[in-house]
Image (tube, rainbow, N blue to C red):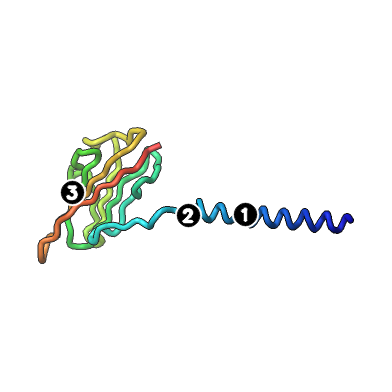
Amino acid sequence: MPVVRYRLIYLGLGLLTVATLSICYVFGRGGDPLTLPDPLERVSPNPYDAVLPQSGLEVDLKVGYEARIYVDGYPIPESELSFQEGVGVYRWRPGSRSLIAERWAVGEHTIRVEWEKIYGLPDVGQFTWTFRVQ
């Protein structure tokens, strides 16, 4: 009789493990993968992310595009943007010398990127997303 009891306990634990892993798989999967417009290769923070107040903003466009970036409706001055021309990456971080913000306020923030191709056929567009600062 004790052997049957142990087998039932092991069977119950095995079923519980399978059920737990199944629930984690079903509810733990993220939503659809992020799809960005063509010239936009990457943004950080990602849409709907929760970030810390010291986080920076990064926009990665294909080479040959210029961007104007807005934080909560305010344009980031070019003097505050760090731009790596060879790879098309724009970076900005709130700071004491920033005209936009000294630091991220807790809550939701909206970022809008407007781009324009600087050579060849014209290509303009924009992308807007939000994230939350904790």
Residue that badge 3 annotates? 68
In the image, what residue type sits under mark 3? Arg
Q: State how far apart marks 1 and 2 are (Cα).
A: 16 Å
Mark nearest the camera among 1 and 2 is 1
Mark 2: few/some/many CA within 10 Å (<14, 14-19, 20+): few
Image check: 92 left or right of 117? right
Mark 3, Cα crowd under 10 Å, few <14 / some 14-19 / many 20+, is some
Q: CA distance from mark 2 to mark 3?
A: 34 Å
Query: Would you name the residue on which mark 1 appears?
Result: 19
Q: Which residue is painted at 34% across and 48% down in the image?
A: 47
Secondary structure under tag 1 reads helix
Residue 17 as seen in the image, left or right of residue 23:
right
Which label's residue is closer to the chain start, 1 or 2? 1
* Amino acid at the residue labelled 1: Ala
Q: Is residue 12 left or right of residue 96?
A: right
Q: x, y (%) of residue 39?
A: 23, 60
Q: Quadrant of the N terminus?
A: bottom right
Q: Is residue 119 above or below residue 46?
A: below
Q: Residue at x 28, y 59 (%)?
A: 41
Q: At which x and y percent is residue 120?
A: 10, 66
In the picture, residue 77 is in which quadrant?
top left
Discs 1, 2 touching: Cβ within 8 Å: no
- Tell me: 3 left or right of 69: right
Q: Position of residue 121 (x, y in %)?
A: 10, 65
Instruction: Classify the position of the C terminus by image quarter.
Output: top left
Where, by quadrant of the figure, is residue 119 drawn?
A: bottom left
For the question of whether residue 125 can be seen, the reply is yes
Nearer-the-camera pick, 132 or 29: 29
Given the image, on which type of amino acid does mark 2 rest? Arg
Q: Secondary structure at mark 2?
A: loop
Residue 29 - label: 2
Crowd class of label 1 (few under 14; some 14 to 19; many from 20; radius 10 Å): few
